[in-house]
Amino acid sequence: MTIGYLLKTNNKLLKNIQNIKKIYIPIFIILYFIFTNIVGAHGINDCSSKSVTIWYFSIIIGNIILLIFSLNIPKSKLLLFIGKNSLLYYGLHTTVIRIINKIVALLNLSKFILSNIFIQYTFTIFLSLFLIILLIFPIKFINKHIKFILGKF
C-alpha cells in the first residue's frame, strides 16, 4: 500500500517506472523465478542471512514486476467488476478452494502438483483464472437478489 500511495502522489517516480525498457521485464521475471526457487529449495526457516537476503530480493523483484505489469494493463470491464466486488471474491473464494482441495486429494494429484515448481505455478495460475470466472455467477446473484448482505437496499 505504501508503494502504491507513493506512486500515486509522485508522478515523476511513476513515469520513471513506466519508462523502464521492455528488455528489463524478462530479466526481472527470470531473476524472480531464480530467487523463489533458491528460497524454496533451502527454505526461509533456516534463518541464515543468505536465505533472508535472497528472500527479500525475490520480494522486491516480484513487486517491481507487479508494478510494471499493472501500469501497462488497459482498462477492462472484468477488472472493474473484480475491483467493485473484491470483498465478495475474498469471502467466496475459500469455499471453492476447499472443494478443489478435496477433489485434488481424492484424485491423488497433490504429489504430482507438488513435484515440480513449474507445475505448481501453472496450477496456481489456472486455479486463479478458474476462480475469477466461476465466482462471477454467485457474485452477480448476490448483487442482484441478496443486496442487503452487502448493505445495499
Image: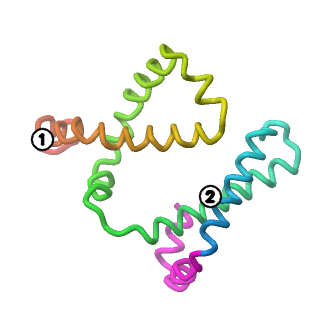
At x 26% / y 53%, what residue is drawn? 81
Say the numbered circle drawn on residue 62.
2
Residue 87 on image: x %, y %: 34, 44
At x 11% / y 36%, what residue is drawn? 145
Disc 1 marks which residue?
144
Bounds of the magenta segment: 1-22
In-image side of 56 versus 134 (left or right): right
At x 49% / y 16%, what residue is drawn? 107
C-alpha gap between disc 2 and disc 1? 37 Å
In-image side of 108 versus 51 (left or right): left
Amino acid type at mark 1: Lys
Amino acid type at mark 2: Gly
Near mark 2 (Cα within 10 A), the count class, few <14, some 14-19 or many ≥20, is some
At x 57% / y 75%, what residue is drawn? 22
Residue 114 on image: x %, y %: 63, 30
Query: Tag 1, which secondary structure?
Result: helix
Q: With respect to residue 128, does 70 lie above or below?
A: below
Residue furthest to the bottom in view is 12
Query: Is residue 18 one of those drawn in magenta?
Result: yes
